[in-house]
Image (cartoon, rainbow, N blue to C red):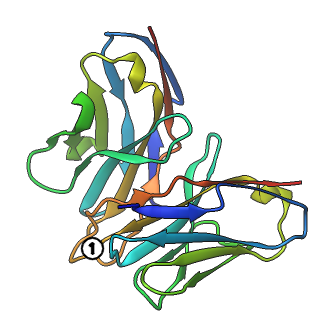
Amino acid sequence: NAGVTQTPKFQVLKTGQSMTLQCAQDMNHNSMYWYRQDPGMGLRLIYYSASEGTTDKGEVPNGYNVSRLNKREFSLRLESAAPSQTSVYFCASSEHGTGNNQPQHFGDGTRLSIL
Amino acid sequence: AQSVSQHNHHVILSEAASLELGCNYSYGGTVNLFWYVQYPGQHLQLLLKYFSGDPLVKGIKGFEAEFIKSKFSFNLRKPSVQWSDTAEYFCAVNLDSGYSTLTFGKGTMLLVSP
């Protein structure tokens, strides 16, 4: 049981390049999330998908796009990478029922450096 | 705006010392509260959560947290820390109505010296 799988684990890009971070979960969860983690800033929500077919902006969406490809997969795209997007990116998923008390399950992260 | 505050950015303790990490939130309404731990180089893992019932919640690895509604607090405690507890700890909160995403605190880095 893999849980939440992110690829790649590491990536170095040049400013202006584009790339897509992949995320897949095998827990049949409705909701999926993308966060970035920066030192001293905690986790900040970039985009989320409450259910298959929907996506919404989080706290820091500028410079990113997402696609909920199906229930399992939720990708994050940087169209034109900037040094300010150097960060560790985490994907997470959770079940969502009648309340919001289900915990989120996290992937191992993607460490992204933009030169 | 909704926010989560963790009082200490860095905490250094010796093994066997007691731990208390503070977390305060500013939300109107019924909340769900979580503590996550991130060991060096790893992803976040759930330590414990509170959503209703007994405000004293016990989690994994001997951790517990107490929800004090009047103080908008959810402090994490452990009576005796171990070197293996060295990690970053995050408090997170969401509303228990509609669809509400998690808001994380900035984290507390705990270093336990042997």
Residue B62 in view in this figure:
yes
The residue at 21%/41% (across/down) is: B68
Which chain is indicated by disc 1?
Answer: B
Quarter of the view holding residue B37: top left
The residue at 30%/15% (across/down) is: B18
Residue sitting farthest toward the bottom: A53
Residue sitting farthest toward the left: B53
Reply above or below: A47 against B14.
below
Residue A36 image offset from top left, x and y in percent:
61, 57
Reply above or below: A67 against B35.
below
The amino acid on which the numbered mark 1 sits, given as a three-letter code, is: Ser
- Viewer-proximal residue, B31 or B63? B63
Relative side of A5 to B59, left or right = right
Q: Mark 1 points at which residue?
A: B97
Quarter of the view holding residue A110: bottom right
Residue A80 image offset from top left, x and y in percent:
84, 73
**Number of numbered tags placed on the structure image:** 1
Quarter of the view holding residue B21: top left
Relative side of A64 to B32, left or right = right
| Circle 1 crowding by C-alpha within 10 Å: few under 14, some 14–19, many from 20 | some
Residue B27 in view in this figure:
no
The residue at 64%/55% (across/down) is: A9
Reply above or below: B66 against B84.
below
Residue sitting farthest toward the front: A1
Relative side of B93 to B112, left or right = left
| Quadrant where the C terminus of chain B is found in the figure | top left
Residue B76 image offset from top left, x and y in percent:
30, 33
Looking at the rendered structure, the secondary structure element under dot 1 is loop
- Viewer-proximal residue, B73 or A82? A82
Residue B108 image offset from top left, x and y in percent:
49, 33
